[in-house]
Image (tube, helix red, strand yellow):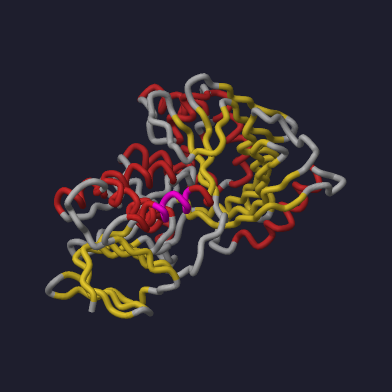
Amino acid sequence: MKTIDLAIIGGGCAGLSLARDIALSLEGKQDRREVTVFEPRTHYENDRTWCFWSLQGEAEDPLVRCRWNSWQFSRNGETVLHRSSQSRYCLVSGADFYANAITTIERADGFDLRLGVQVKSVESCADGFRVVTTDGDYLARRIVDTRPPTYPKGNEAVLYQAFEGIEIETPHEIGDLEIANLMTQMHTDEDGFGFDYILPLGSGQWLVEATLFGFEPGCGSRLSEKLQSCLNRLVPDGDFRCLRTEKGMIPMGYRNPKPESDTGWVKAGTAGGAVRAASGYAYRRIQRWSRECARQFIESGEVSRHPEDSWPRRKMDFLFLRVLRSEPQLAPELFYRLTSRITPDAMARFMMDRASVLDLFAVMWSLPKMPFLRNLLKRDHRARRLPLQKGAA
């Protein structure tokens, strides 16, 4: 049985980020650590994009492929356009992220990325944890578990953000090349709250996605139809070439489980609290956690969870999700009012967890009060209880 210092279960964004950041921290040092990443997939594909706002004063992410200083929202023919000289909406492609992380991990002494390996169980033992895999057993001193969450009764998310997208190449200009279309054609139907997401990537390339805020994990069953309708509207003659596709589901308002009872075993990624409840944004939060967890591991050999959101932020986010769930027909109006009544930079700071007190007041002032008052006083079903009490997880 091989002994290692750290087992990272799952080689997605969180797992690869942590392994990469630990490896970077050890470069040039006489400090060898045995770190193994266990990932079920046998190879990586360009199957993801991660987006976020880069704020004034923040260091540039070298993996950013595209940046926009303008972004917009629309519903029923009305459009809100945000332009900023301080904030930029950024995109990181899965291909670039995977290549960067894997290259860094592979050149680090003592690091191993085990593709095609499934972790069957983790058992506490006297010297740490016994990790039982399809490729044999390992003895790990510390565990970071990034496997996706499950949704047993009483532990569901409030909403589920499902998306299905296609990257196309077309001779047609299907939008403004300088504007990221974040939430266009906002509407509500029997499936939930939906919108289109359209990003110009340059050289005649576009990312087109259909997105839905639904009520169950399987809510995206009709997204292929919605995506096709969007493509028919944008490129009526069908003159485009498919470069790649992507799809996924993000739990919004997932009730993170209590901390693991075993010291040295933590959850990370979506199941560990990486996703911002009311937005679904996770990439920046994962990178901040990864750097801090890597620092702590190098200095003390310990690993850390994602930091818990502040009580006011949890309260605001979960109340907003409660309104969207109980009164989904209001969603287009709520997002339209929010985006039309706050500044672009205030919105960027709010979405990236960097809002000032004035930003928070601006957000609250922009929204209608009665839907939130109705839902603040509404008694939740036990399985849907939201963490609105101070100190709740």
Q: Quadrant of the N terminus?
A: bottom left
Q: Residue at x 85, y 45 (%)?
A: 236
Q: Is the magenta region chiefly helix, strand or loop?
A: helix
Of 246 and 137, nearer the camera is 137
Image position, residue 68 (x, y; %): 57, 30
Image position, residue 127 (x, y; %): 13, 72
Q: Which residues are magenta?
A: 97-103
- Taking 155 as reference, is 363 above or below it? above
Of 228 and 317, nearer the camera is 228
Q: Residue at x 36, y 78 (%)?
A: 135
State the residue lying farthest toward the right.
237
Confirm whether residue 31 shows in the render: yes
Q: Is residue 100 magenta?
A: yes
Q: Residue at x 44, y 49 (%)?
A: 100
Q: Is residue 39 magenta?
A: no
Q: Can you tell which quarter of the image residue 333 is in? A: top right
Image position, residue 159 (x, y; %): 51, 53
Confirm whether residue 385 shows in the render: no
Of 182 and 117, nearer the camera is 117
- Taking 114 as reference, is 58 above or below it? above
